[in-house]
């Protein structure tokens, strides 16, 4: 059974649908048990065998990201860039890791947390616009939650697998995976006219909303909705001047702060950029209608 959910290639859409229907459950742990009836697959196998190119836990598909080196941020002569994206600096990611292929959906949130991601009041007043809640509330749309709520979700995964390997990506890991080896403004190049093929973006509040994940073109490493749909929380505190002092190896962000970083832009028009290097921040308690997350599963 485990060979069905791990491998060196990509899962076919048919296969993913089969897995989803075969493992549908209100309990994320039950999903895992269904997929791995002998218990928590993973810990021993991950230690003794080469980590596969992808795997599924809790009905979340993870893509293996190889270690490497990249230029983080934007060049000094990039007129589109904000000051907080400079200086561009080399960063080395020393360890492979898994990153969710999609933003966490409301269906996945419900399965793990046992309640809808929209149970709590929204920090964003636009949620109360006519029709907005109905447009946002769909099982395969992203869960829009606060940074602290994302931590609770990850703690639940860690509790259930008992290995402490689920977390948000660092800001450097996020940009490394989003760029996927590219040095251009977007993971598909520099031409903003191509953005609509890769991202849900720029919609108004009267008719727009999040969208079902995975409908646009993925980036070169097979990650969907890196640009747009929802902003994605990362682990780091935000500090505008951090790049001037950032370590060059596995940077973890500032040691303290008041806001957390979000990346990638979102579906609505007030997101001003969807570039790979663009940075923005929110209070970790902010629960909006356009910020979600995709988790990392560390390779032990
Ligand atoms: Ca996104």
Image (spheres, rainbow, N blue to C red):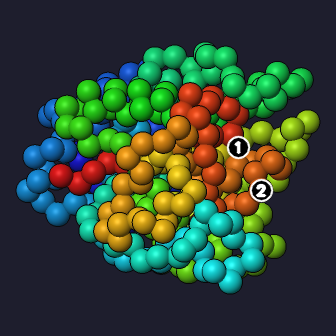
Residue at image point 67% right, 17% down: 121
Residue 30 % position (x, y): 32, 25
Residue 165 % position (x, y): 26, 43
- Local crowd at mark 1 within 10 Å, few (<14), some, or many (≥20)? many
Q: Is residue 291 left or right of residue 87?
A: right
Residue under pointer 1: 211
Identify which residue, 88 or 28, lies in the foreground.
88
* Displayed quadrant of residue 274: bottom right
Proximity of marks 2 and 1: CB atoms separated by less than 8 Å: no
Identify which residue, 236 or 32, lies in the foreground.
236
- Local crowd at mark 2 within 10 Å, few (<14), some, or many (≥20)? few
* Displayed quadrant of residue 191: bottom right
Residue 152 % position (x, y): 41, 27
Residue at image point 29% right, 37% down: 35
* Displayed quadrant of residue 65: bottom left
Q: Is residue 194 above or below residue 232?
A: below
Residue 164 % position (x, y): 24, 38
Residue at image point 41% right, 38% down: 59
Q: Is residue 209 left or right of residue 70?
A: right
Quarter the N terminus occupies: top left
SS assignment at label 1: loop
SS assignment at label 2: loop
Q: Earlier in the sequence, mark 2 or mark 1?
A: 1
Residue under pointer 2: 272
Q: Is residue 25 visible?
A: no
- The number of numbered discs placed on residues in the rendered structure image is 2
Q: Is residue 249 visible?
A: yes
Residue at image point 70% right, 34% down: 289
Identify which residue, 131 or 172, lies in the foreground.
172
């Amino acid at each position: 059974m485990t060979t069905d959910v791990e491998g060196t290639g990509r899962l076919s859409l048919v296969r993913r649908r089969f897995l989803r229907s075969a493992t549908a459950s209100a309990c994320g742990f039950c999903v895992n048990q269904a997929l791995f009836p002998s218990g928590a697959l993973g810990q021993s196998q991950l230690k003794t065998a080469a980590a596969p190119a992808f795997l599924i836990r809790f009905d979340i598909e993870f893509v293996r990201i190889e270690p490497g080196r990249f230029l983080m941020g934007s060049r000094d002569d990039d007129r589109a860039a904000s000051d907080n994206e400079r200086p561009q600096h080399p960063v080395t990611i020393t360890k492979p890791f898994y990153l969710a292929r999609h933003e966490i959906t409301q269906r996945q949130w419900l399965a793990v947390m046992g309640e809808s991601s929209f149970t709590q009041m929204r920090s964003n007043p636009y949620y109360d616009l006519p029709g907005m809640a109905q447009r946002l509330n769909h099982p395969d749309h992203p869960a829009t939650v606060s940074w602290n709520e994302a931590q609770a979700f990850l703690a639940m995964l860690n509790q259930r697998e008992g290995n402490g390997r689920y977390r948000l990506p660092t800001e450097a890991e996020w940009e490394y995976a989003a760029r996927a080896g590219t040095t251009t403004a977007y993971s598909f190049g520099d031409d903003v006219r191509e953005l609509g093929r890769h991202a849900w973006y720029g919609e108004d509040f009267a008719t727009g909303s999040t969208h079902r994940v995975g409908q646009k073109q993925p980036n070169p490493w097979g990650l969907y909705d890196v640009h747009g749909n929802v902003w994605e929380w990362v682990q780091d505190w935000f500090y505008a001047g951090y790049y001037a002092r950032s370590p060059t190896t596995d940077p973890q962000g500032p040691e303290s702060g008041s806001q957390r970083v979000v990346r990638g832009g979102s579906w609505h028009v007030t997101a001003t950029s969807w570039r790979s290097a663009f940075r923005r921040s929110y209070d970790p308690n902010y629960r909006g209608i356009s910020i979600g997350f995709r988790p990392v599963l560390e390779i032990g």
